[in-house]
Amino acid sequence: MSQANPIRNVSDTALWVAIYRAMESERHDAHFVDPFARRLAGERGQAIVDAMPRGKTMSWPMVVRTAVMDEIVMRCVQQGATTVLNLAAGLDARPYRLDLPASLRWLHVDLPDMVGYFRERMAGEAPRCQLEFIAVDLRDAHTRRELFANAAAHGPVLVITEGLLVYLESDQVADLARDLHDVAHARWWLTDLASPMLLKLLERQWQPQLRDGNAPFLFGPAEGTAFFAPFGWREAEFRSTWDESLRLDRTMPGAWLWQWLGYLQPAAKREASRRMSGIVLLESDGAAA
């Protein structure tokens, strides 16, 4: 990490995103309210936003992601999810801020240092459901599978990997997909997904800082959600970050111009642009239709 770069490792990206949740929460027309976000982000989170190119103006994809995932989490719980397996949970305060049933089991999983930091910052706060903190390194296959088997015992299981996959190699994502299907027996998997087009766009803007901070963007499969099919997952829902940003009125500066230019593109190219980034709900191929 260079002296000018406050990102030390991939866990620091959770501080960065927490500032964006705080910024949205403080708006009069907020789509969600996370009263813990600024406390969780701390001074380092603000320093990261200040140091990143266009740091403040690029809050919109993270705000969109949070708002859409909140909606899908609540819907899956209403449809019968009894355990939420939140992997690389970072500073996710959903168990404290969403109107969740008290009987819901929520597993907040991350590296020991991050879990310790989150618990310290949230001391004295009461979750709305049965929250369990699990400090593990998911790269350890044996430990990962023990955790997943434990989650499966209290299903149906909803898995969340918000902001995780983009930092993994393809073979790591494949191993995770296989274990979530075969060991966790998860019914739903909620994640965000980048494309090669998005990674290329971000390469000049953010990649130097992220690589220097040991947190480069890596995973953006050319085949999109079809990447997960060999491991037992099918796309149940794809919410384009771009489309949702327009719907929620949380989009990039000059969006109107990009929208207008998009109408001039061939249909296939427009669709590729729509799917450049999205929030995805995958469903197990063994789930009831």
Image (cartoon, rainbow, N blue to C red):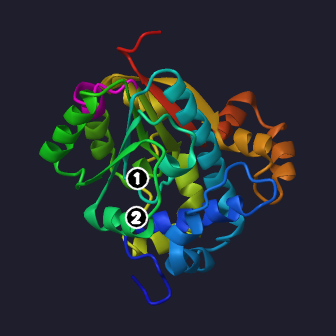
Residue 49 visible at all: yes
Nearer the N terminus, badge 2 or badge 1?
1
On residue 118, which mark appears? Answer: 2
Question: What stretch of residues is rendered in magenta?
Answer: 179-187
Q: Residue at x 61, y 54 (%)?
A: 62
Considering every residue shown, the one lying at the far bottom of the view is 3
Residues tagged 2 and 1 counted as in contact (Cβ below 8 A): yes
Dot 2, crowdedness within 10 Å: few (<14), some or many (≥20)?
many
Considering every residue shown, the one lying at the far left of the view is 142
Pointer 1 residue: 89
| 273 is higher (above) or lower (below) than 50 | above
Q: In this view, does 243 lie to the left or right of 172?
A: right
Q: Quarter of the image holding residue 85? A: top left
What SS does tag 2 mark? helix
On residue 16, which mark appears? Answer: none
Q: Tell me residue 30's x, y (percent).
A: 75, 53
Q: Which residue type carries mark 2?
A: Phe
Q: Does the magenta stretch include residue 268?
A: no
Q: Tell me residue 159's x, y (percent).
A: 39, 36
Q: Tell me residue 203's x, y (percent).
A: 53, 63
> Gap in Å between the C-alphas at discs 2 and 1?
10 Å
Q: Quarter of the image holding residue 211? A: bottom left
Q: Which residue type carries mark 1?
A: Ala
